[in-house]
Amino acid sequence: MSAPTSSSVGKSDLASRLRQIGEERYHHRHPFHLRMHEGQLTRGQLQAWVLNRYYYQSRIPIKDAAILARCEDADLRRAWRKRIIDHDGDGDAAKPGGIVKWLRLVEATGLKREQALTGEGVLPATRFAVDAYVHLVSEKSLLEAIASSLTEMFSGSLITLRVDRLRQHYPWLSGGLAYFEGRLTQAPEDANFALDWVTKHAGTPAEQHLACNALRAKCDILWAQLDALYFAYVEPGWPPPGAFRPVDHGKS
């Protein structure tokens, strides 16, 4: 990890440094995503992605609850709890949260939602990576925890591209894309709030260093999840014992 600079930078300069980290390290450049967007994944490979990604989705409200539990600022708590509702929903079946929407995507691939709910077949590396994220948020400083969420600054363009390419190349998934459609507005709102908070509270070189490294760590966690999927289901295609094994029928 890079060492802290000797002097702090202004809010706009820190924001630029954080955005540069995303340009260099966010998982939009991962070969698994590139294959997805080029229509080169089989149904089984998409099933593996959706199943493993559900484990990550299921931990998002847990990590956000960990952040809430450490917030002494009521204004911050009020703003942050929106994230939990976005994913868990508020009990209104007519307005499902992100987790329910992701389960619909699971079903659209041809898997049963119970498989995602139980975690059956999730890659060990997925669990290690996602659990490392929850650990980071729970154990590091509040500044680092919030800075780690700033990957949402880069997700908007990726989601827009993903929805377009999934509809184009995998039309049988169209009925399960509501999760991404919701995140097109939710993610930018969350990212703008978190970026403003981080740039206000990272005033010293040491704090700015912590914020940048937390964002790098989160990018690494996202990248590691795709590394595991690529190794298990693309090349060389070696899923470990107990992992999901697709019955492939091509893209359709």
Image (cartoon, rainbow, N blue to C red):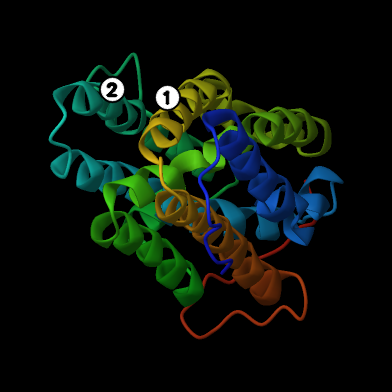
For the view shown, which residue lies furthest in the bottom direction? 241
Mark 1 Cα shell of 10 Å, populated few (<14), some (14-19), many (≥20): some
Q: Which mark is residue 64?
A: none
Question: Residue 119: x and y, percent?
Answer: 37, 62
10 Å crowding of disc 2: few (<14), some (14-19), many (20+): few
Q: Nearer the viewer, residue 105 or 211?
A: 211
> Could you say whether the residue bearing mark 1 is in a helix, strand or loop?
helix
Which numbered disc covers residue 193?
1
User: Which amino acid is tagged 2?
Assistant: Ala
> Is residue 160 or residue 246 the one in the foreground?
160
Could you tell me if residue 6 is visible in this image? yes
How many numbered marks does the figure carry? Answer: 2
The residue under the point 37% across, 51% down is 144
- Residue 79 has which mark? 2
249, above or below 3, in the image = above
Quarter location, residue 67: top left
Q: Secondary structure at mark 2?
A: helix
**Outermost residue toward the front in this view:** 6
Left or right: residue 56 compared with residue 65: right
Farthest residue in the top direction? Answer: 94
Q: Quadrant of residue 136?
A: bottom left
In the drawing, does residue 32 fall left or right of residue 191? right
Q: Residue at x 45, y 76 (%)?
A: 124
Q: Position of residue 24 (x, y in %)?
A: 73, 53
Q: Nearer the viewer, residue 67 or 54?
A: 67
